[in-house]
């Protein structure tokens, strides 16, 4: 069964936790990927204008990811690596 990144409960407010869940095609699992000038990406919820944000800009393994209003912080910038 495929998995997806999901805004918990299809939430749309600042602080909504983001989790992995089984794919169901709901709005909380749909994302817009925006290329930024520096080559990184912003990942925006299709349900709201909120973006993926690392809680408290943590650099620790297992840090929580949530939705937050975009403010262009480095904790809202993402890179993607190809799978081998």
Image: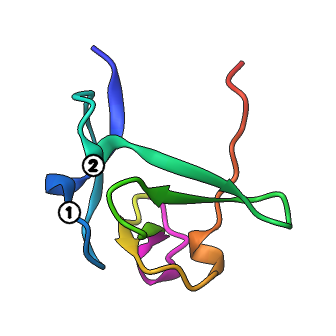
Q: Quick check: is 36 in the magenta stretch?
A: no
Task: Give the residue number, with chain letter if any, for mark 2.
Answer: 28
Q: x, y (%) of residue 34?
A: 66, 56
Residue located 68% across and 43% down the image = 80
Q: How is the image coloured?
A: rainbow
> Disc 2 vs disc 1: Cβ atoms closer than 8 Å?
yes
Q: x, y (%) of residue 10?
A: 20, 54
Density class for disc 1 (Cα within 10 Å; few <14, some 14-19, many ≥20) is some
Q: Is residue 35 left or right of residue 52?
A: right
- In front of the other: 27 or 17: 27
Please determine whether, in this image, residue 36 is positioned above or below residue 10. Answer: below
**Secondary-structure class at tag 2:** helix
Q: x, y (%) of residue 57?
A: 52, 80
Residue located 57% across and 85% down the image = 71
| Quadrant in the picture for the C terminus | top right
Q: Find the magenta span and give its range.
A: 53-61
Task: Give the residue number, with chain letter if any, for mark 1.
Answer: 11
In the picture as drawn, the residue positioned furthest to the right comes out as: 38
Measure the C-alpha gap from mark 2 to mark 1.
Answer: 7 Å
Q: Is residue 36 left or right of residue 34?
A: right
Residue located 64% across and 58% down the image = 78
Q: Quick check: is 55 in the magenta stretch?
A: yes
Density class for disc 2 (Cα within 10 Å; few <14, some 14-19, many ≥20) is many
Residue located 33% across and 19% down the image = 2
In the picture as drawn, the residue positioned furthest to the top comes out as: 1
**Secondary-structure class at tag 1:** loop
Q: Is residue 77 left or right of residue 7?
A: right
- In front of the other: 41 or 61: 41
Q: Is residue 58 left or right of residue 66?
A: right
- Specify which label sits upstream in the sequence, 2 or 1: 1
- In front of the other: 61 or 1: 1
| Quadrant in the picture for the N terminus | top left
């Amino acid at each position: 069964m495929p998995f997806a990144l999901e805004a918990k409960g299809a939430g749309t407010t600042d602080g909504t936790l983001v989790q992995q869940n089984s794919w169901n095609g709901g709005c909380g699992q749909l994302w817009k990927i925006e290329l930024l000038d520096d080559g990184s990406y912003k990942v925006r919820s299709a349900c709201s204008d909120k973006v993926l944000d690392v809680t408290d800009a943590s650099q620790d393994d297992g840090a929580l990811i949530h939705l937050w209003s975009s403010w262009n912080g480095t904790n809202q910038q993402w890179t993607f690596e190809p799978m081998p």
